[in-house]
Image (spheres, rainbow, N blue to C red):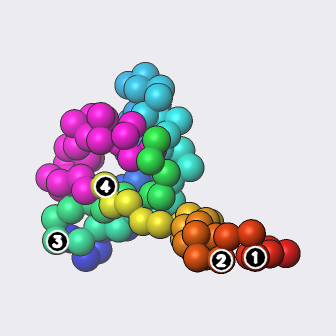
Amino acid sequence: MASLSSKNVWGKIVLYLKEHKKISLYVACGDITDVKIDNNKLFIKTSDDFLISVLEDGKKELENALRWQGLNLEVEIVKFESIDQMRDKDILKLSKLFGDKLILE
């Protein structure tokens, strides 16, 4: 499994979705670039809650796209916090602590 290119596999998944007219899933997957293959799993990472929802709903179709390539991998969707999300969370904590005294520039 180590010789598999996750980017190549992902590109073929996106192509499969387009060819099979799974448009909403195709559009959702089009911007995703953070994918990795490890331990017979395809890990798809995103920080977008909407994308996670679309990916979860389309998980079966993603696995079909893998089988179309002759691969028997499980799909795992991984949520991570983006830098913007972490910053917003920190600002919220600080504003609760300091209230009107907090000045952001």
Asked if disc 2 and disc 4 are in contact, CB closer than 8 Å, the reply is no
CA distance separating discs 4 and 1: 40 Å
Mark 2 / mark 4, whichever is N-terminal: 4
- The kind of residue on which mark 1 rests is Lys
Of tags 4 and 1, the one toward the viewer is 1
In reply to whether residue 66 is colored magenta, the answer given is yes
Above or below: residue 60 compared with residue 78: above
Foreground: 50 or 90?
Answer: 90
Disc 1 target residue: 101
> Which quadrant of the rendered structure holds the N terminus?
bottom left
Mark 3 / mark 4, whichever is N-terminal: 3
Disc 2 target residue: 98
Foreground: 84 or 69?
Answer: 84
Give percent across and percent down for residue 16: 38, 36
Disc 4 target residue: 77
Disc 3 target residue: 39
Mark 1 Cα shell of 10 Å, populated few (<14), some (14-19), many (≥20): few
Mark 3 Cα shell of 10 Å, populated few (<14), some (14-19), many (≥20): few
Give percent across and percent down for residue 51: 45, 44
CA distance separating discs 3 and 2: 46 Å
Which stretch is magenta? 51-76
Mark 2 Cα shell of 10 Å, populated few (<14), some (14-19), many (≥20): few
